[in-house]
Amino acid sequence: MNSNLAKRIIIALIGAPLVIWLIVLGGHFFFTLVLVIALAALNELRLMVKETNAETPDLLLFFSAVLLLANFSYGFAPVSHLIIAITVGFSAIELYRNRGIATHNLGASFLSVFYISLSFGTLFWLRHLDDNGLFVII
C-alpha cells in the first residue's frame, strides 16, 4: 500500500466519524463545520476563477459567503434581501475600480459567492428537518 493511500485511509477513519458527530450535534457545531467546508470550497473556486483573469474583491467575497451562511443557519433576514445587498455591493465596487473586464469580474464574483453559499446553505434547511441530522448524513 502506498503512503498516499494510507494517509487518506487514516484521515477518513478519523474525519468521517468527526463529521457525522458534528452533524448530529447540530447548532453552532454544525454551523462551524459547514462554514469551514464552504469557505474552503469558495477559496478553491476563487482560485479557479482567477485563472481566467477575473479580478474578484476577495474580502467582500468571503464576507458575503459568511453572511449568507449565517443567515441560512440563524435566519436574521430574508435571503432575497441579502442577495440584493450583495449584488449591489459587488456592482458598486466594480463600478469604481478599473481592473479587467467589469462583466467578467462581476460574473466570477456572483458565481463564486452564490454558487457556494446557496448550495451549502441548503444543508441548514436539511438539518432542521429532523432532530438528528439524518437527512444531511444521507
Image: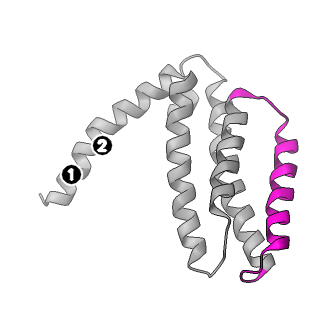
Q: Is residue 19 above or below residue 90?
A: above
Between residue 60 and residue 52, name the one nearer to us.
60
Q: Main secondary structure of the magenta part?
A: helix
What kind of residue is marked 1?
Answer: Lys
* Residue wearing tag 1: 7
Decide: marks 2, 1 in contact (CB < 8 A)?
no
- The magenta span reads 74-101
C-alpha separation, residue under disc 2 versus residue under disc 1? 9 Å
Seen at 42% across and 30% down, the residue is 20
* Residue wearing tag 2: 12
Q: Position of residue 8 (x, y in %)?
A: 26, 51
Seen at 78% across and 75% down, the residue is 97
Seen at 55% across and 71% down, the residue is 48
Q: Is residue 84 magenta?
A: yes
Tell me if 130 is positioned left or right of 7 in this view.
right
Tell me if 91 is positioned left or right of 21 in this view.
right
Question: Residue furthest toward the left?
Answer: 1
Sequence-first tag of 2 and 1:
1
